[in-house]
Image (spheres, rainbow, N blue to C red):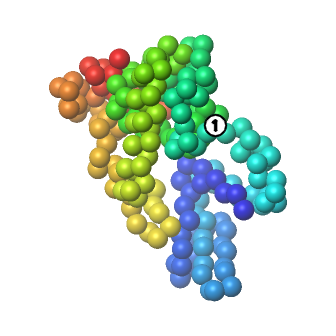
Amino acid sequence: MIFHLGMSGSWRIDHATLEKHDHLLLETDEGRRLALNDPRRFGSVDLVPTDSLTDWPAFKALGPEPFELEAKDLQRRLGGRTAAIKLLIGDQRIIAGLGNIYVCEALYRAGIHPRRAAGSVSLERLKRLVSAIKDVLGEAIEAGGSSLKDFISPDGELGYFSKSFSVYDREGQPCACGGTVKRIVQSGRSTFYCPKCQR
């Protein structure tokens, strides 16, 4: 079973009652209940034979997992590309599973301006970026994710990584370097960065 949570989907485990936007209910032989709640209905559920997983079109098109990413591979994927680095590292075909919040935070930690042409970023800077991506995701996982608006984990707990944001959702606030966090829109998504320390 392959599921995509879309923009606002979440799994709830062992809740006694169904909620308004529970669209799929699974019950195990042990009596556990899993409910897929998806208010916006952007999520999906597919049943795929196990031996066909690697050939499933959505998986086949994905880039490497962030924790398996190497700077040389990223350089190869970005080589010659003039699109903004922020847009390309958020592209699931370049790096799988890296969302907008974590892209902003990783670029900040690596000191890379989100509008910089992806193909112009040096290998040394890409090494810093790959390290920052792994650090940001590791810290976010440890904190239970980033609860914004409607994110909640299956056990009902909120994620607390949002308490550690350096730039995301901090427009107009001071950066640690003394600059001021700015917000721009790239491909319809908010990008937060510090123009003083991100070049």
Placement of 125 over or under 153, stated as above or below: above
Residue, x 44% and y 42% (percent of image)? 134
> Along the line of sight, which residue is nearer the eye, 196 or 64?
64
Total tally of numbered discs in the picture? 1
- Which image quadrant: the N terminus? bottom right
> Along the line of sight, which residue is nearer the eye, 19 or 77?
77
Q: Position of residue 56 (x, y in %)?
A: 78, 48
Q: Position of residue 31 (x, y in %)?
A: 62, 86
- Please tell me in which quadrant of the rendered image residue 76 appears: top right
Placement of 35 over or under 56, stated as above or below: below
Residue, x 40% and y 29% (percent of image)? 128
Residue, x 54% and y 16% (percent of image)? 119
Residue, x 29% and y 38% (percent of image)? 166
Farthest-out residue, bottom: 30
Residue 183 in view here: no
Placement of 9 over or under 96, stated as above or below: below
- Which image quadrant: the C terminus? top left
Residue 24 in view here: yes
Q: Disc 1 designates what residue? A: 63
> Along the line of sight, which residue is nearer the eye, 47 or 54?
54
The residue carrying pointer 1 sits among few (fewer than 14), some (14 to 19) or many (20 or more) residues within 10 Å by Cα, namely some
Q: Position of residue 26 (x, y in %)?
A: 67, 74
The three-letter amino acid code for the residue at tag 1 is Gly
Q: Position of residue 117 (x, y in %)?
A: 50, 15
SS of the residue at dot 1?
loop
Placement of 183 over or under 67, stated as above or below: above
> Along the line of sight, which residue is nearer the eye, 42 or 147?
147
Report whether 109 appears left or right of 123. left
